[in-house]
Image (cartoon, helix red, strand yellow):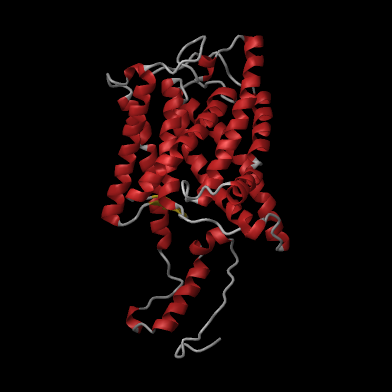
Amino acid sequence: YGDFAKGTARRVVIPRTIHVQESHNAPAIAEAIVWMRKALQPPENLWIDAKDQIWQIKEWATLIGMLAGLFSLLPLGTLLLGTPPFRSLRDRGTGHYACSALSYFKLVVVNGIIMWLYLPIILVLFAIHIYVIPIDKAFPMMMVNGIVGWFVGISMIGLILFRFWFKRKTRREGLTLGDFGISYAVVRFSLGGWKIIKTIILAAILFVFVYLCQGLLESVFIVDFRFIFPFASDLTAERAWISLRYFPFILFGFLGLGTFLHGQIRPRALSTPFRTWIFWSLSGIFAVVAPLVLFLAIQYVPLFTTGAIPLVGPGGMFVSFVLNLFHIIGVLIMTTPISTWFYQLTGKIYLGALVNALLVTWMFVSSQVIAPIPV
């Protein structure tokens, strides 16, 4: 309706897709292109059919580039761990513990219940921000604040439960923190002195490598690491400063996650290290992703079947955070195999946790909006 000549032309198109897919929906893109043609009147010789779309090539290519960049850390880390400065970090662990199938599923269910505190923890965080003390001056990315607050919250709960579980295991089976890759010493907690320092240095080298790979990609081809969501791009000076504030909290979350994945629910090893890595990675991905997929089903099954949105929240804020679970699931699918690989090489949770904390801090800070969410 309206008139292009008068600047009043309007058109409403409702594509049959969810919000996350709107920018990657071929019919929706075709509608936008046709609208631009009518509005701008380009020469006919410069026009192609709106249905002739090849953007999918670029989108899948950037996914391949991102996965290649991130997973190049695995062979690079292996090579560096074979050099004299870092050779002392190599350790296959004690191997005195393997989680049974029954215990695995029990622990996954408990962890899933904890992960389902996603929206309550976010609601508490925003209540503190609004009614107690504003936090956006120090932590200006309120969407990231909600996600990181949830990650830290469930990690704290998980570590408390792990402590009780570990005491019971110690009494019954004589296991130690070393058996779970948490301590460099056998019978007491220890970070290994120079070993943890070397671990930090190695994690920093690995992160700088993948950051420079992305920087080269972005400077030459003007694309960054993305697939549907923008995952990571160059950091401005402001965002680099912001990342220092978020990093400790994200690191704490990955230390808790590493304790769960490589300690509590670590399955038995298979016949070869590579098969073990595949098996452990898939079991870890299932443990952390399945609860979130079920959570998404609560939102989207009613939406697809009845048109109703169950989880809305104050000002619609829950809708945004539920949408962000797609992004979180993608991050967990990529980081779990990285964590598993470095646990296998070092027998400890720390290198994987440090590398993943650096990567995810970079992802969040470089791609998320610096703004409060209206509530």
Q: Residue at x 55, y 57 (%)?
A: 373
98 vs 248, nearest the viewer: 248
Q: Position of residue 110 (x, y in %)?
A: 68, 32
Residue 65 visible in the current orientation: no
Q: Residue at x 46, y 52 (%)?
A: 368
Q: Position of residue 323 (x, y in %)?
A: 58, 54
251 with respect to 88 (left or right):
right
Quadrant (top left, top right, bottom left, bottom right) of the N terminus: bottom right
Which picture quadrant has residue 109? top right
170 vs 298, nearest the viewer: 170
338 with respect to 212 (left or right):
right
Q: Residue at x 53, y 51 (%)?
A: 143
Residue 311 visible in the current orientation: yes
Q: Position of residue 18 (x, y in %)?
A: 59, 61
50 vs 238, nearest the viewer: 238
Question: Residue reaching furthest right?
Answer: 306
Quadrant (top left, top right, bottom left, bottom right) of the C terminus: bottom right
